[in-house]
Image (spheres, grey):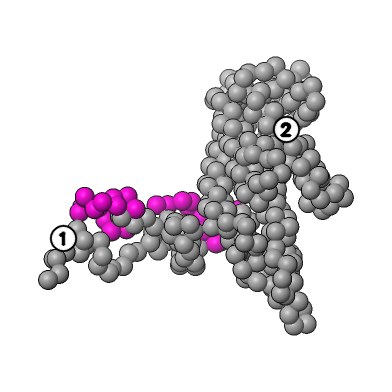
Amino acid sequence: MMEEKKPIDRKRESGGYADIGSKEEGAIMEMRDIGGRALIIKERAIYEMVMADTIDPKRTNINLPTTIQKLIIDKGTESEVVSRTLLTAMTLFNKDYIVDSIDCKKIISLAIDLLSEISILEKEIKEYQLAEDSASNEYEERKKQLSSYKLPSVVSLESKCKTIFQKADHIEQTLMDIIVNFYPNIGLTKQSHFPNLHQKLKEKYNENDSFVLFIGNAIHFMQVIRELRNGLDHRLEHTKVLDYELQSNGDIISPTIELQHKKIKLERTSLHEFLDLTFTNIIDIVELTFAFLAQKNVRKSGIPHLVREIPENKRRNKFLRYCFWSPLGEEGYYNQ
């Protein structure tokens, strides 16, 4: 005689449905199991679906919902940032193309973490830039009204910068964690930095290899980010973030940033503009690193596969630029 199931067992094992997020976030475009993480990608949001048994494997709490939604990021397939990071990783790090020694699901799980950090960085940068824009606009309005003179300022400027460059440095560490999973035996760790990565890749390939050259070109920027983070963390004299300044001719200079490290320099420049450059460079470096990692670790048997940039008129997603290409048909096949 079969033992009757407990109410909690019947609840956990019964069928059902769930609405993911809201209608404003658009349609569900893709669902993936990423190393045990159920990922739901919508047009304007990404969710992780967690099962009750994951949280309560011994089934002690009947009141837990059978499934729990967790918003990872409030952007989806329509976002350029999502497309050039996570969706690029999901397209390239496919076990059908990548060598067996690479755990593609682990890599994509790390790419999810990377995207979360990039999203936080983007929000921190935008919040700072809004604060600067607001201070500048208020100053211009006061000038028009001939009000008493007040120099504009951004409250907690240095603290805001410290948070931004800490997050930018964390992104490098997560990216390095991904890289180490592709190269576990060449003397790198997830605490390594781009100069060491460049040296190890040069030893593995050669100094004229395209991946080696790309990393070499990225080194200076990544070192600037690291030294800015160190300087702000430890209040070192070589790192200067200056608020609005009044010049002798009456002009106002908006906030600036400067790095005069003994080896790594950043001449005094607009903080607003440098933060734009920082975010742009990070997205470029992540996207192209993913493309190089995929090409360097592609399977060699069967039909040859190459990582190529997708022509704009052939893209299913206008922001997703790289995929594997196979020499099938007149123009080849782009596996998007």
**Could you tell me residue 151's position as x and y percent?**
62, 22
Tag 2–tag 1 contact (CB < 8 Å): no
- Which residue is at 27% across, 69% downward? 15
The residue tagged 1 is 6
Residue 44 visible in the shown view? no
Amino acid bearing label 2: Val
- Which residue is at 65% across, 71% downward? 335
- Which residue is at 62% across, 39% downward? 190
SS assignment at label 1? loop
Magenta region: which residues? Answer: 54-83
**Could you tell me residue 59's position as x and y percent?**
24, 53
Q: Residue furthest right?
A: 208
Marks 2/1: CA distance?
Answer: 60 Å
> Residue 324 falls in which quadrant of the image?
bottom right
Q: Does 301 sit left or right of 62 as displayed?
A: right
Amino acid bearing label 1: Lys
